[in-house]
Image (cartoon, grey):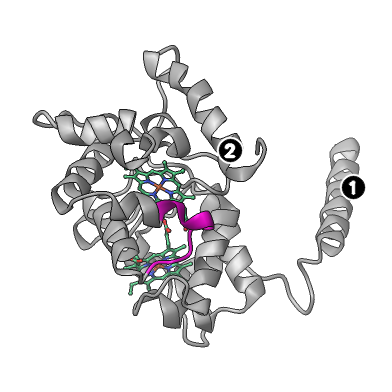
Amino acid sequence: MKKQLFLGALLSVVTVSSLAASGASRNEVVNGEKIAREGNGRGAVGCLVCHGMHGEGVSVSGFPRLAGLNARYLEKQLNDFVSGARDNVVMKPTATALSEDERRAVADYYSKLSVPERVAITLESNEVGEALALRGKWDQQVPACIQCHGPNGVGIGEHFPPLSGQSALYLANQMREWKKGSRANDPLGLMKHVAQSLTESEILAVAKWFSSQPTFLVENSDITSQVSAQETTQEKVTGGKQ
Ligand code: HEC
Ligand code: HEC
């Protein structure tokens, strides 16, 4: 009992000092979960209204899932909504109403929520979508999507967001935004090039393909052997491993 009390005291000392060391507390610790649920009282409404109770998104409305996405990717998107590099009438006022610390805290919060577990959905055959996802469109220098987005599109590191577990509507919308130029926040214009090389029916097909993929990799499936190919492309893109 005594030992437990001592351990408890020790832990709280460690927690307090590590918070201070990370600079998380200036006046008060910013609470990412509170922002997600209630907003910040200064113009940002609670994110769950649109992104779901557990950050799973709302497929029919094209509201993306945030749960389990990389924290730095999410933070970058919020900053891009503020700067206008990603122009969106809904997210701009919300992101602008958050301070930098609040954007970081809410991004950290969503990154830690578990990825909604979804198994593959069997669709009618979708050869066009599958070919783009797995092999690309080399006559227009479009690499396979999985070379950057990972096998099944589960996402890799802070640069390459997951595509599986997002609705087809959301995915297709993003590619249309790149085509129009209202989303212009991608490093090296990688996605602008990809989107501009696809026709509207290819966009729909590949969006449908990824939205039907499982959000987790199955161990030992032949798809895991695609990882090495994708690592090579990423080295070229980011100039090194992540
Ligand atoms: C009124 C609805 C609404 C609210 C409230 C809202 N969002 Fe969004 N959010 C959207 C929509 C719609 C998009 C997709 C925008 C687009 O198409 O580019 C989006 C996109 C995003 C993205 C980009 C995701 C990705 O995969 O690139 C992030 C990050 C995000 N929202 C965070 C938040 C946070 C944090 C809050 C709460 C402070 C919030 N949102 C509140 C509707 C909303
Ligand atoms: C050379 C690397 C590369 C390839 C190949 C690639 N992407 Fe991307 N993609 C990216 C990067 C980087 C981002 C994130 C951009 C940012 O920072 O906002 C992205 C983001 C996206 C997004 C937005 C996701 C979100 O949460 O908002 C969609 C949709 C997407 N890609 C679809 C595709 C599809 C479909 C293909 C294949 C036809 C593809 N990508 C091929 C690098 C790539």
Q: Does residue 54 appear in this view?
A: no
Q: Residue 108 location, x and y as percent?
A: 60, 57
Exactly how many numbered labels are in the figure?
Answer: 2
**Is label 1 or label 2 in front?**
2
In-front residue for pair 184/25: 184
At horizontal 81% and vertical 60% (from top left) the residue drawn is 22
Earlier sequence position, callout 1 versus callout 2: 1
Does the stretch in magenta take in 140? no
Label of residue 236 in the image: 2
Q: Which residues are magenta?
A: 183-191
Which quarter is ligand 1 in?
Answer: bottom left
| Identity, as a three-letter code, of the amino acid under mark 2 | Lys
Label of residue 195 in the image: none
At horizontal 24% and vertical 30% (from top left) the residue drawn is 131
User: What whole-number distance in Å separates the C-alpha atoms at marks 1 and 2?
Assistant: 46 Å
Which residue is label 1 attached to? Answer: 10
Is 217 situated above or below 198? above
- Please rate how many residues cluster around mark 2, counting C-alpha atoms within 10 Å: few if below 14, some from 14 to 19, many from 20: few
